[in-house]
Image: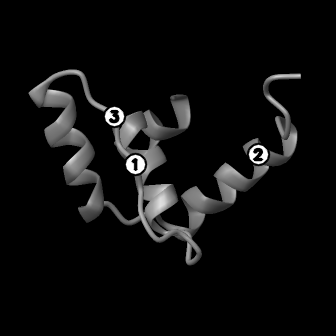
Amino acid sequence: MDLAHKHGLDPSQMALAFVNQRPFVASNIIGATNLEQLKSNIDSIDVTLSDELLEELQIIGARYSNPCP
């Protein structure tokens, strides 16, 4: 969440944008319990993550490769 906020992004939009930018993803399943969340999730299609942000996500992913041991 800190990384998303550092880059001025909503954490959910950042996560969905990350999935959207994977070349092997055919669809992205979103989840929303209200219209505000649904709008935010849909708007994530217009978010493009920078190379810098993607590198920072890789570092976090390497550090916490199994967040639920």
The numbered mark at residue 37 is: none
- Crowdedness of circle 1 by 10 Å Cα count: few (<14), some, many (20+)? few
Measured along the vertical axis of the image, is residue 41 above or below residue 37? below
Amino acid residing under circle 3: Gly
Image coordinates for residue 59, horizontal then vertical, percent: 77, 49
The numbered mark at residue 31 is: 3
Q: Which residue is mark 1?
A: 29
Measured along the vertical axis of the image, is residue 43 above or below residue 38? below
- Please tell me which residue lies in front, 61 or 50: 61
Marks 3 and 1 in Cβ contact (< 8 Å) = yes
Amino acid residing under circle 2: Gly
- As helix, strand or loop, the secondary structure at mark 3 comes to loop
Q: In which image quadrant can residue 33 be found? A: top left
Q: Residue furthest right?
A: 69
- Crowdedness of circle 2 by 10 Å Cα count: few (<14), some, many (20+)? few
Residue at 26% x, 43% y: name it: 41
Residue at 38% x, 66% y: name it: 48
Q: Residue furthest bottom?
A: 23
Amino acid residing under circle 1: Ile
Measured along the vertical axis of the image, is residue 9 above or below residue 5? below
Disc 1 from disc 2: Cα separation: 21 Å
- Please tell me which residue lies in front, 22 or 28: 28
- Please tell me which residue lies in front, 11 or 53: 11
Disc 3 from disc 1: Cα separation: 7 Å
Q: Which residue is mark 2?
A: 61
Q: In which image quadrant can residue 64 be found? A: top right
- Please tell me which residue lies in front, 33 or 16: 33
